[in-house]
Image (cartoon, rainbow, N blue to C red):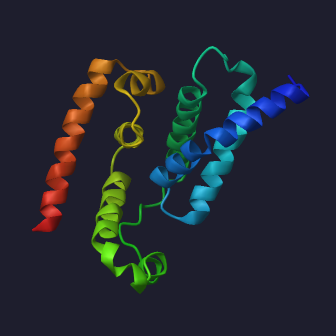
Amino acid sequence: MALSVDEEEMFLRLVDQHRGIIRKVAAGYCQTAADQHDLSQEIMLQLWKAYPRYAPDRPFATWMYRIALNVAISFLRRNTRPIRQTVPLEEIEREFPDENAGIRETDERVLLLQRIIATLDPLNRALLLLYLDDNSYRDIAAILGISETNVATKLSRLKERLRQNLNQTKE
């Protein structure tokens, strides 16, 4: 079913308004820029294909997250290359030049968090990304198709696991 010009414009406006979702999901599920680009393109394609079934009475961001996460999980399964656990020194220096030395410690903690997220299974990775994006438990539950109670329980366990991982790296 082809979209009308108005529907196409609405789709593009909504995607542009929520484009950060695609970036966050791609960054959370892919380690390389090339993979992030490929995943972003796949997410856009699936959003476009699914848009005729989008119900405008529901939040677009919730619908978009659900599709993006499902595509990311499928992408991860298809591309079963080992996850890179290290970052070449050249990439770190390119990302954090010496003039940013004052914020290097915070940046290193962000890199550490990204590495930990990369080791999580797809559901926990999605759960953490949604939580870090300040989604409510209700929205997370709707996006992932689980109960709010389940979200709270899983997040509590995940936070504890993250604390343990972060504490182990400090030692």
Residue at x 40%, y 85% (from the top left corner): 98
Residue 81, given in percent of the width and then of the height, sits at: 48, 59
How far from the left and from the top, in percent, is residue 140?
41, 28
Q: Residue at x 35, y 25 (%)?
A: 137
Q: Residue at x 36, y 71 (%)?
A: 86
Measured from the top left, where is residue 84 in percent x and y? Answer: 41, 66
Q: Is residue 149 above or below residue 44?
A: above
Quadrant of residue 2 within the rendered picture: top right
Side (left or right) of 65 relative to 160:
right
- Tell me if residue 123 can be seen: no
Q: Residue furthest top?
A: 57
Image check: 163 left or right of 95?
A: left
Q: Nearer the viewer, residue 24 or 71?
A: 24
Do we see residue 7 in this rendering?
yes
Residue 105, percent from left and from top: 27, 71
Badge count: 0
Front-lying residue, 70 or 156: 156
* Residue 1 located left or right of residue 171: right
* Quadrant of image for the C terminus: bottom left
The quarter holding residue 150 reads: top left
Q: Quadrant of the N terminus?
A: top right
Q: Nearer the viewer, residue 27 or 83?
A: 27
> Of all residues shown, which one is farthest toward the left?
171
